[in-house]
Image (cartoon, helix red, strand yellow):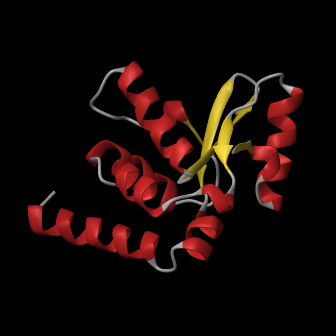
Amino acid sequence: MTGTVADAAPKETTVATAAVHAGRELAHPDRAEMRLENVLHALSDPMRLLIVRDLARTDDELACSAFELPVSKSTTTHHFRVLRESGVIVQVYRGTAKKSALRRDDLEELFPGLLAAVLEAADLQEARDGA
């Protein structure tokens, strides 16, 4: 069963309260519903990996407009949805802005070391590619 942010970890519950009061609620999987194959699929796309790498550099929530991706707005929206529905990120509305943050604690609890390993591998690949 797919939950909402309100069903998630304590930090996310606070976030969910804002989303509910704003009249907009975004579905997120409960921690127990997160599946390795869905997380790996979400992380396998280069654009989604860019989003995750940007989010990993901060503990803050970032607005979707903070990301400069070389794809259309509708494609960007799709990538955020895949990340959210897999459980990699949490998204909430703050006023008119949709804010995103990594679900670090959930990912680490369910898949210890996975996020760190993927981020390190992405950094090494970028260094090899000379980007």
47 is higher (above) or lower (below) than 129: above
68 is higher (above) or lower (below) than 61: above
Q: Quadrant of residue 24?
A: top right
Tell which of 12 and 98 is nearer to you.
Answer: 12
In the image, residue 54 lies at what x, y percent?
Answer: 44, 53
Residue drawn at x 40%, y 21% as measured from the top left: 73
In the image, residue 37 lies at what x, y percent?
Answer: 40, 58
Residue drawn at x 50%, y 54% as measured from the top left: 55
Q: Quadrant of residue 69?
A: top left
Q: In the drawing, does residue 16 fall left or right of residue 21?
A: left
Residue reaching furthest bottom?
112
In the image, residue 42 lies at what x, y percent?
Answer: 40, 49
Q: Where's the N terminus, which quadrant? A: top right
Q: In the drawing, does residue 26 fall left or right of residue 88?
A: right
Q: In the drawing, does residue 129 fall left or right of residue 41?
A: left
Residue drawn at x 69%, y 33% as measured from the top left: 26
Tell which of 1 and 103 is nearer to you.
Answer: 1
Q: Where's the C terminus, which quadrant? A: bottom left
Q: In the drawing, does residue 23 fall left or right of residue 88?
A: right
The image shows a total of numbered marks equal to 0
In the image, residue 28 lies at what x, y percent?
Answer: 65, 43
Residue reaching furthest front?
1
93 is higher (above) or lower (below) than 9: above
